[in-house]
Image (cartoon, coloured by chain):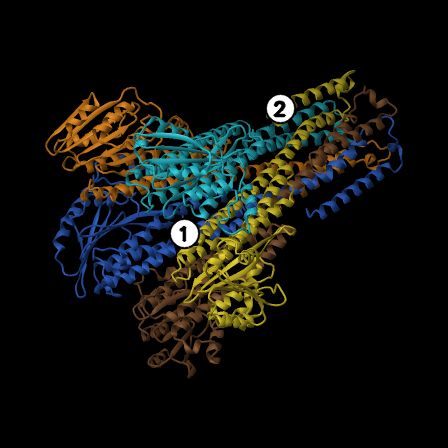
Chain colours: A yellow, B cyan, C orange, D blue, E brown
Amino acid sequence: MIGFIKKVAKKIAQPPGTLIHVGEKKIETVKLSLIRYNKDILEEKEMESPFDCLSEKDFKGVYWVNVSGIHDAGIIEQIGNNFGLHSLVMEDILNTLQRPKQESLEDYVFTVLKMLYYDKSKKEVLSEQVSFILGSNFVVTFQEREEDVFDPVRERIRKAKGRIRKMGADYLLYALIDAIVDNYFLLMEGLGEEIEALEDQLLEHPAPEILQTIHNLKREMIFLRKAVWPLREIINGLLKDESKLIKKTTEIYLRDVYDHTIQVIETTETYRDMVAGLQDLYLSSVSNKMNEVMKVLTIIATLFIPLTFIAGIYGMNFEFMPELKWKFGYFIIWGVMAAAAVAMFIYFKRKKWL
Amino acid sequence: MIGFIKKVAKKIAQPPGTLIHVGEKKIETVKLSLIRYNKDILEEKEMESPFDCLSEKDFKGVYWVNVSGIHDAGIIEQIGNNFGLHSLVMEDILNTLQRPKQESLEDYVFTVLKMLYYDKSKKEVLSEQVSFILGSNFVVTFQEREEDVFDPVRERIRKAKGRIRKMGADYLLYALIDAIVDNYFLLMEGLGEEIEALEDQLLEHPAPEILQTIHNLKREMIFLRKAVWPLREIINGLLKDESKLIKKTTEIYLRDVYDHTIQVIETTETYRDMVAGLQDLYLSSVSNKMNEVMKVLTIIATLFIPLTFIAGIYGMNFEFMPELKWKFGYFIIWGVMAAAAVAMFIYFKRKKWL
Amino acid sequence: MIGFIKKVAKKIAQPPGTLIHVGEKKIETVKLSLIRYNKDILEEKEMESPFDCLSEKDFKGVYWVNVSGIHDAGIIEQIGNNFGLHSLVMEDILNTLQRPKQESLEDYVFTVLKMLYYDKSKKEVLSEQVSFILGSNFVVTFQEREEDVFDPVRERIRKAKGRIRKMGADYLLYALIDAIVDNYFLLMEGLGEEIEALEDQLLEHPAPEILQTIHNLKREMIFLRKAVWPLREIINGLLKDESKLIKKTTEIYLRDVYDHTIQVIETTETYRDMVAGLQDLYLSSVSNKMNEVMKVLTIIATLFIPLTFIAGIYGMNFEFMPELKWKFGYFIIWGVMAAAAVAMFIYFKRKKWL
Amino acid sequence: MIGFIKKVAKKIAQPPGTLIHVGEKKIETVKLSLIRYNKDILEEKEMESPFDCLSEKDFKGVYWVNVSGIHDAGIIEQIGNNFGLHSLVMEDILNTLQRPKQESLEDYVFTVLKMLYYDKSKKEVLSEQVSFILGSNFVVTFQEREEDVFDPVRERIRKAKGRIRKMGADYLLYALIDAIVDNYFLLMEGLGEEIEALEDQLLEHPAPEILQTIHNLKREMIFLRKAVWPLREIINGLLKDESKLIKKTTEIYLRDVYDHTIQVIETTETYRDMVAGLQDLYLSSVSNKMNEVMKVLTIIATLFIPLTFIAGIYGMNFEFMPELKWKFGYFIIWGVMAAAAVAMFIYFKRKKWL
Amino acid sequence: MIGFIKKVAKKIAQPPGTLIHVGEKKIETVKLSLIRYNKDILEEKEMESPFDCLSEKDFKGVYWVNVSGIHDAGIIEQIGNNFGLHSLVMEDILNTLQRPKQESLEDYVFTVLKMLYYDKSKKEVLSEQVSFILGSNFVVTFQEREEDVFDPVRERIRKAKGRIRKMGADYLLYALIDAIVDNYFLLMEGLGEEIEALEDQLLEHPAPEILQTIHNLKREMIFLRKAVWPLREIINGLLKDESKLIKKTTEIYLRDVYDHTIQVIETTETYRDMVAGLQDLYLSSVSNKMNEVMKVLTIIATLFIPLTFIAGIYGMNFEFMPELKWKFGYFIIWGVMAAAAVAMFIYFKRKKWL
């Protein structure tokens, strides 16, 4: 998480709009794919060069260019130039440390989101940046990896499932954002399960290792929050967009995503509260445990220290110690000790220490 | 509470408006009942098929369709189509994990609320989703279960108690929401009693189990808050609704519910503060208890350790230890020990440890 | 405080506007008194029946009806009907758990406030609900008890002190609210003294009982806050009222009360902070105390445990222990022990434990 | 700080606008001084009676009446009447517990501020109330004491330093407020030094007395905050004043004071954070210290308790204990003990307790 | 950090606009340099006297005057007069304790920012004040030191890299602010690394010194926050500036800086959360450690205290103690002790203390 600041350094001292990829390179080659469709037609193809995009511009329908891999600044620049993107927009696409945002420019709307995955084996939240360009009849998407949350949307286009084939590019944008937000719920489920497991473990046996786990969870939450909170603003931005790229009929769908977004944000906050609660519970458990340990120590010590003292007394070597000569001295002393122990025991019982 | 995220997974990768019931199935069969009334007429009947709703549309007066059981997506869809509901609205009705919300569409107003019950035996807050559709002369309600907080409203309609029979569908909607909000007060009462009982128990004997109870209460509070906070916004939304479905005369009643809503929200916050206060009190009590235990240990140890040392001295086997030969050595030592004990005792008294 | 939720239950499942008294019955019989005045005339009388109010309606001047005791729903209803009050308004007057609020209706302004008393003997904040109806030339006030914070206002009317006899009903309303807010300062004084006393006690001897007192104070604060915060909103509401019942000339007076209200709210917050600070101080004191206890234990134990060990060594019964035969063995051992004790003492001094 | 509520009691039950001095009497006699000036003329005189003010009203230039001592309600009333002040304004001037505020009336602007001093010897923040009346060509100031933060302003008027002699009454008001805000920086400096000294002391030797000092500082902060926060609102109020008493040319100066105000507020918040940080540091230090003490106890106890046990074994008086007869039994036991001690020591080292 | 208040004192009691340098003198002589450029021309020169600035006013293009060293109030005043700056603006430039701000005056826009450096050796955040004056065709910058974050911008101007040579003075202002904000990322990187290192260290071995480091980090965070938060407002101010000095085409660049600013602010907040998390982790670790220590003490003590007691019993010198005469008494006692030790051991195991 701190890492996300580290790599910015190489960009510093460059003029704005300088196209440098910031972040890890996650796949080998950039893959360009195109889908174009309207109510009747559907075409899919892999593109070899970014220049192929251009030729599609006059298509009557929607066309969607998907770019997997953004580490090659040259390719992104060519695509950007084809679609007339501002150099700052291209810079943001390349910078995977970009904060989620939405910006309306003259001819297009630019949106950056974070795709989040939950790696159950490492118990870690992974992040990928996804950028969207919405034009009058096209959507361009930029992803860091090839594995794809957009597949269900592609499937719907192919099978003409739902209304997607009848609607415009703005509906496609909605469908893609919706796919990403839907995926957040999977993440929430994974985190929720981890929190529940942690809670069970905590109640059974609060080992010190849990502290580290809670600390990590808290960090994940800080990270998650940063990715999720801007969503509200972004979808609001799309809803209030004045560029007329987003049609009235799509608004109800965007409001629906907005609703889901609020639910994700609220869940994040709930989880934060819960993790904080777990930490409190852990600390209290430790303190309870310690209390119990202290009690045992105190009981043992307060029971035996006086008894040992009595034994010590009669272990002294004074020449004249009358009790030592008594016939039943030894047994009397045992009696005294037993009485002291019982008295102490009753005292502890009353104090509710036992 | 975490559970509410779990079941979303099955909906992911579906086009928006896909009608899938999300949540537990709480009753066996869907039950449809209809009440229609105006100042003079009152009719009640059970409907067998959702198509029966349609025939009521021209009735001069108010008619109210109540649907108990929302697990059958097919039936909900038929009802929805009869009333011209948007597919996203139907989706929300079916999704019991929906956040409480209010949306004004062209011909109708859509509202989702949470009905909350307090299960005293399990000390748990249970939740049921209730959705409302308000049209020009009808209200459709969707519940998960059959047992019914709406019965008092039905009774009022039947007996023409109050003004309900003279008013329109918007007043009916108000009366139903009011019934739900009224029920929250019962919940608050249950929780309040539990908090008070907990406090009494805490002051008497702060057992470690209380920590778990407090932790659970805190979780209930997080849950409650999520259900209750959106209410404010929802009723405000109804008050500011521009669809003219809500008449001027009903506004004063809605403002009254709004007032109650604020009271519920404030009580939730008060309870949160109180539970947090209980936790502080618990931790302080534990720490006080520990302090007391420590003091006893210290007093016993500091009293007897030096005495035992003295006894140890005269238990040594040196050949030449003059005190051992003294006639009253033994009694002198007893005197020394008693003096040391008394000095210590006075010291403790001064330090206010006794 | 939790109690305030408890009694709502009996109202649930009643149609809105059902007149049921919610709360404790605080006096035996309802008392109705009337004062009417203008610059020249002053009349006071006790009324026997609520119907007597009606006859005053055409009086040229201000008339003020005060109702002490609101447990008799019938009487309140008759009064309400006389003045044309909405049934929801009457319901709020009867419901002593009502949140403080202000509502402008067509012909009158309705305000609910909490009168707060500080019971010094029980160290408890008591609350009474006071409702106001402001009409064009009348004010109706509803109180739960007879003892009366309004007496100074009455006195001013009687003696024509200040400008009250020359002003309208709105000024009377102001004067009455002002009397209530002024009374809050007395409450604040009582609480402030308690906090100061607590602080002194805490610094002198932090007994565990203080924890309970702090906890109670915190609860009082939560309660106080709920009564005091809405005031701001209420007086703002009166200032922005569009019903023209409140004249321009009265506004400066209302702004003055507003100012006092802010001061009360700020003081409440200050007290909250101070009580929280006291709790921190208490916990730190306890922890300090414990630290001190621990130190004494450690010093005693670390001093004597090694010495006792040495004594133990020479208490062993080995046949061949050369030291035992030495002539000055015993004294040498004493020397060794003293040296060890001194070394330990110096060590503690350096560690700043002594 | 709590005291500020205490003295309100005597005002309760008085009609609004009753002129009673609330607060301590800080000087013996009320002193009235007048300065009148314009670009060319400068006159200064002490006034004997408040009626002398009146005669100055037609002066072409600015005249400034300063009143030191506000405990004589009669004098304040005469001055107030001369300048046509509302009785509520006069009441606020006399009430030294008044919250800082700004109010625009018809012909004049009324402002109340708190002058704050830091008493280094008592380590206490002292407060004095200063009220301002700004009219078209005059400023009236009311102070509680004679010693004077306004002296530099007077000096500037006398020496015609800066632009003050060329500007109007609004600039004079600005200059006076500026003098007060400037003085806050001195206070901040004093508090800052105290915090720094406390921190140094804390790091060197965290004595329990520091807790009390931190607690006092926290209270000072609460007090300071109440005096400083309203400033923002006040100066904003002056900037947005519509009475035309404040000219366009003075606005840039007021914005400058506003800036300083923000800086003072931010510093207050920073100090609050720092004091809270100090408390955390103190508590952690205490806990660290305790940990260290515990470790020493544990090490000593765990080292010697087993050794003492061994010594105890061979102190038993059984007739048949073969080891006692061994020639080197005593030395062997010493060896065993040394080995046990070394093993323990290594264990502690590994656990990083040493 | 507290220091920043200290030096204000010397300015107090001065008329507004009095030019006094507040802060440390960081370089010896004031250095004035000038760059003027347009698409075709580029001139750079060192100026000897502030009067040289004036002659550049009619240049068709952009000219940028950079002032390194602001301790000489005379020079700043001459420059200020040349550019027609208000005396309050000059005062702010000279006052290095000025809060970051932006102000639009008639002919120019005035902006104050903090340049922040991270001194890795001292682990300290250093601060320098940078002020900007933007006029129609010029930018004047004032720095405290000579070493220069503006070098990359100069380089871009010299090499006509990017669009800077083709744009106006507003773009230059943007480029300079961007250089400063970019530099914040370097600071963030340094701090991030420190936090990560601290976390690693904490998990390995939580030494008490870490507490001090965390405390220092928290203070740095408070300081950082104060410098960074106003940035948002400042850039917003520039974006909404109505002086027409900032052209439409530059806005998208300013929005980009705004974005970076938000990212810096968010990172600051994240770091705050993380440092707070570290403190929690530290305290919990210490408490865990202590728990562990306590357990060892308890185990050792509870094991050996009873055994020592038994040994003490048979060390008593009673004449009649039958066990002492038994042939295998010694070995039986060893058996009893071993049994007691094993029983205790099993008890501890069950309690999960081992």
| Residue type at the position of mark 2 | Lys
* x and y percentages locating residue A97 in the rendered image: 53, 62
* x and y percentages locating residue D176 in the rendered image: 27, 56
Residue D268 has which mark?
1
- Whether residue D281 sits left or right of residue A210 in the image: it is left
| Nearer to the camera, C314 or E184 | E184
Q: Which residue is mark 2?
A: A349
| Nearer to the camera, E90 or B150 | B150
| Residue type at the position of mark 1 | Thr
The answer to whether E189 is drawn above or below residue A82 in the figure is above
Q: Quadrant of residue C218?
A: top left
Q: In whole angstroms, how far apart are the C-alphas of marks 2 and 1?
A: 52 Å
Q: Quadrant of residue C65?
A: top left
Residues at discs 2 and 1 both on one chain: no
Q: Quadrant of residue B264?
A: top left
| Residue that lies at the very extreme toward the left in this rendered image | C40
- Whether residue D328 sits left or right of residue C32 in the image: it is right
Residue C324 has which mark?
none
The answer to whether B89 is drawn above or below residue B301 in the figure is below
Dot 1 lies on which element?
A: helix
| Nearer to the camera, C130 or B191 | B191
**How many neighbours does mark 1 have within 10 angstroms: few (below 14), some (14-19), or many (20 or more)?**
many
User: At 24% across and 32% down in the image, what residue appears?
Assistant: C85
Chain where mark 1 sits: D
Viewer can see residue D23? no
* x and y percentages locating residue D279 in the rendered image: 50, 46
Quarter holding the C terminus of chain B is top right
Chain where mark 2 sits: A
The answer to whether B343 is drawn above or below residue C29 in the figure is below
Dot 2 lies on which element?
A: helix
* x and y percentages locating residue D217 in the rendered image: 43, 46
